[in-house]
Image (cartoon, rainbow, N blue to C red):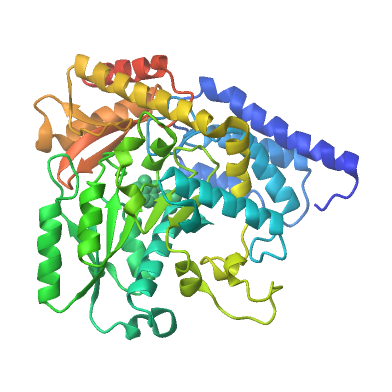
Amino acid sequence: MFITDPEERKKLWMEAVTAVEYYYSQLPALPVTGSLNGEEIRSEIARFRFDKPIDRERVFDFVSRCFVTYNTHTISPKYFGLFDPAPASIAVAAEFLAAAINPQLSSWAQSPFAVEVERHLIRTFGQLFGYPESDSDGTFTSGGMEANHTAILTALARKFPAFPDEGVQGIPDQPILYASTESHHSIVKAARLCGLGDRAVHRIPVDRSLKMEVGSLRRQIEIDRGFGCSPFMLVGTAGATSSGAIDPLEDLAAVARSNDLWYHVDVAWGGAVAFSRRHRALLSGINQADSITIDPHKWLGIPRGVGTFLTRDKTIMNRTFAVRTAYMPRIPDDLARDPFCHSMTWSRRFSGLLVFFVMAVAGIEGYEAMVDRQMELGDYLRSELDIAGWEILNDSPLPVVCFTGKGVRASGKAYLEAIRDSVVASGEAWISITLLDARVPALRACITNSSTAKEDVDRLINALKLSSY
Ligand SMILES: *Cc1c(COP(=O)(O)O)cnc(C)c1O
C-alpha cells in the first residue's frame, strides 16, 4: 500500500501505465457507449468484500476491464457530446506528479512553489481575457460550479459588505441576480448554496439567436427595483452549454455599470477561444467583467477537477473568504498569499500543475492551433449537415451544432430521440438531444475532442443518414 522500496515502486507505476495503455489501445475499436446494465455492474463490484487483501494485478485487471466494458467513452474521437474532451497526455503525467508529491495548497508556507505557479497562471489567464496584469486575481477551483458559486459569493460581499459577517440576514432587501434562460444551471444551484434560493435568480429571455435580450433585462431590473428588491449581479454566458450562444457581452457590461451590478461572465467551455488570435474577438467586452469562470477541464483538455475563477478586484477574494486561525502555518500579515483565505477550499491538490505543464510544453500557440482546428471542424460539420438536408437551429460560431430534420420542429421530439438512440446504438458516434429556449428539441453534436477528424464527422453524418430512414 505504502511502498518504500524504489524498485518495487517503479514496478507499480509501470503497472498503472500498462493499464492506461491497455484502455487507450482498445478505444478505437470500441463502440462509444458501453454496457449500461446497472445490475451487472453492481454485482461485479459487490464481489469485493474488502475482508482480505487481493493481488494488485487482479485489481488492475478488474478495473481495466470494467472501464472498457462499462463506460461511455467520452475521450473517443467519435464522442460529440457535452464538453468532455480527451485529456492532454502531458497533463495526465502532471497529475501523477502532483498526486505523488502531494503539496498542500491551503497555505503559502506549506507549498510556496505550487501557490506561486498557480498565481502566475491566474494572472496569465486574466491577461488572455484582457485584464491588466496589475489587477488580475482569482483562484483554481474544482470546476465551473465552484467558480460560479465563488462569483456569487464575491458579488454579495462587494454589494453587501455585511454579508461575510452576517450572511443573508445582513442584506436588507431581497437580492436578485440575472442570467439568461440559456445559462448553466450551476448558477441556480450556486444561488441555492449561497442561501439565496432559486428564486433569487431571474432568468432573462433570449432572442432568436439564444442570446440574452438586453431590453428584457433592463425592464426586469426596473420591475425588481419597483418591488423594493436589490439587484446585485449580472451573469453573461459566452458559449451556452446547449447551443454555444454568446450573450452580447459589451451591452451587458453597460447595463451592469449603469445599475451597479457585479458583472460575471461564465465562459466555462467557450473561453478557450481567448487563446486564438483569429477567434478571440467573439468574446469582446469580456475584459469589462468583474469576474470570469473558465474551466481548464473543458475545452482546454485538462483532466477533470480543474476550473478557474478570475477577477479584476484585487481585494475581494480576501474580503469574501479570509478567516483567522491560530493553527495554520502563516506568513504574518500576508493574507493575500494564503489560498485558504483566498478561496472556498481548504486542503486542495495542485490543480495548477496540470495547466502549467501544458502551457509550458505546448505554449499558448499549442492551444491556439487546437482551437482553430476544432473551430474549422465545427464549420465542416455544419456544412455537411446542411448538405445532407438537416436544418441547423443555432447560429453559434463555436463548434457545437443543434439541428433537426427539415419540417420536424417542435412536435418531433420522439422522432429525434429515435434518431439519437439509433446513432448511439450504432457505436459510430455519440450525440445528444437538447431543448433550445426550453421549447425546441434539437439533436446536438459538439466537437469536443482534439483528435476528432473529418473522417469521424463523415461517420457521424452517415450514421445520421442510416438512422433517419
Ligand atoms: C460545464 C459548464 C459549467 C459547470 O462546470 P463544471 O466544471 O461542470 O462544474 C458552468 N457553465 C457552463 C457554461 C458550462 O458549460
Between residues 406 and 398, which one lies in front from this camera angle?
398
Of 216 and 68, the residue lying toward us? 216
Please say if 240 is above or below 291.
above
Vertical order, 56 against 229 (above or below): above
Q: Is residue 55 left or right of residue 225?
A: right
Q: Position of residue 49 (x, y in %)?
A: 68, 55
Q: Is residue 347 left or right of residue 74?
A: right
Foreground residue, 18 or 299?
299
Q: Quadrant of the C terminus?
A: top left
Relative side of 185 to 371, left or right: left
Residue at image coords 52%, 34%: 364
Asked if residue 444 shows in the view, the reply is yes
Evaluate whether residue 180 shows in this view.
no
Residue situated in front as seen by the camera: 78 or 51: 78
- At x 36% / y 59%, what residue is drawn? 290
Q: In the rendered view, would you say 198 is above or below 434?
A: below
